[in-house]
Image: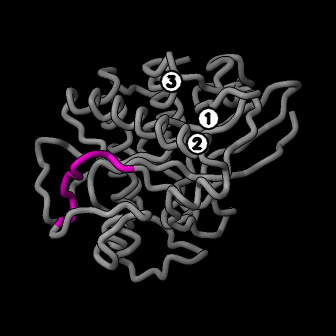
Amino acid sequence: MKHIHAGKVRDLYEDGDSLILVASDRVSVFDVVLPTPIPGKGAMLTQLSNWWFGFFADVPNHIISTTDVPAEFAGRGVRVKPLNMVKVECIARGYLTGSGLKEYQRTGTVSGVQLPPGLRDGDKLPEPIFTPTTKADLGSHDEAISFDDVVNQEGKEVAGQLRDLTLEVYTRGAEHAAARGVIIADTKIELGWDGDVLTLGDEVLTSDSSRFWPASEYEPGHPQPSFDKQYVRDWSTSTGWNKEYPGPEIPAEVVEVTRQKYAQAYELVTGNAWTGFQG
């Protein structure tokens, strides 16, 4: 195999005509990879993503095999089709928080989408919205763009496909999660072309690509408790870190709480206990 790409969390290897996509235990916040890994995170992300790919069986995805990978990558690696990836981060938001909230407070819009006045942190939006960003290189920050920007880059038809598929994945996933006591506030998906077929790649509806909130504790007007890496984001911000490389070392107690949150997200969404990947 040939190592051809290292992302913030995932590594990509070339193996004949297919690729091996491996989720590491690295954690990135504010587009910076922190120096401390979260043990087992890569396996939890991969298995949750695999579960969702099965849930969205009617949506084309890049998976060839979840088991035909080198032994050292078992549980956290998948064999996938090479895709011509779209140079857009496709994000759907059903709730207002994070960078979307900050933009809304400045402009009343998120990625060019006008929202009602008076919304608070955590408020549910009237309907889910498509809020794309640029796809930044490692060490750089993604920047919010509008749907019109996507049209200018990809063409009107493709931009519409990207928006519609992103919102479909979010809406269907959020409905399932809601029945399991989890609010999916927002999510980011990666899309690429398999020939002329728009195809889901990378990961889908994981704790790294989405905000998961416990529905039983939902209370808009302030930041929500979460089952995702928001805990690490909040901790890193509390240190006074300037959100530039290099990031701070994560204390052992924060690592353990974060690991537990990833496991809890997997268990709530799938209905399966997380006991570590058993093969």
Residue 253 position by quadrant:
bottom left
Q: Which residues are magenta?
A: 119-129
- Name the secondary structure under disc 3: helix
**Is label 3 in contact with label 2 (beta carbons under 8 Å)?**
no
Left or right of residue 85: residue 123 = left
Mark 2 residue type: Glu
Mark 3 residue type: Phe
123 is within the stretch colored magenta: yes
**Is label 2 in contact with label 1 (beta carbons under 8 Å)?**
yes
Q: Position of residue 11 (x, y in %)?
A: 70, 44
Please name the residue that numbered disc 2 is placed on: 190
User: If the image is split into quadrants, where does the C terminus sit?
Assistant: top right
Residue drawn at x 34%, y 73% is: 102
Q: Nearer the viewer, residue 100 or 252?
A: 100
Please name the residue that numbered disc 3 is placed on: 53
Q: CA distance from mark 2 to mark 1?
A: 5 Å
Q: Is residue 9 above or below residue 144?
A: above
Mark 1 residue type: Gly
**Is label 3 in contact with label 1 (beta carbons under 8 Å)?**
no
Crowd band around label 2 with a 10 angstrom C-alpha radius: few (<14), some (14–19), many (20+):
many
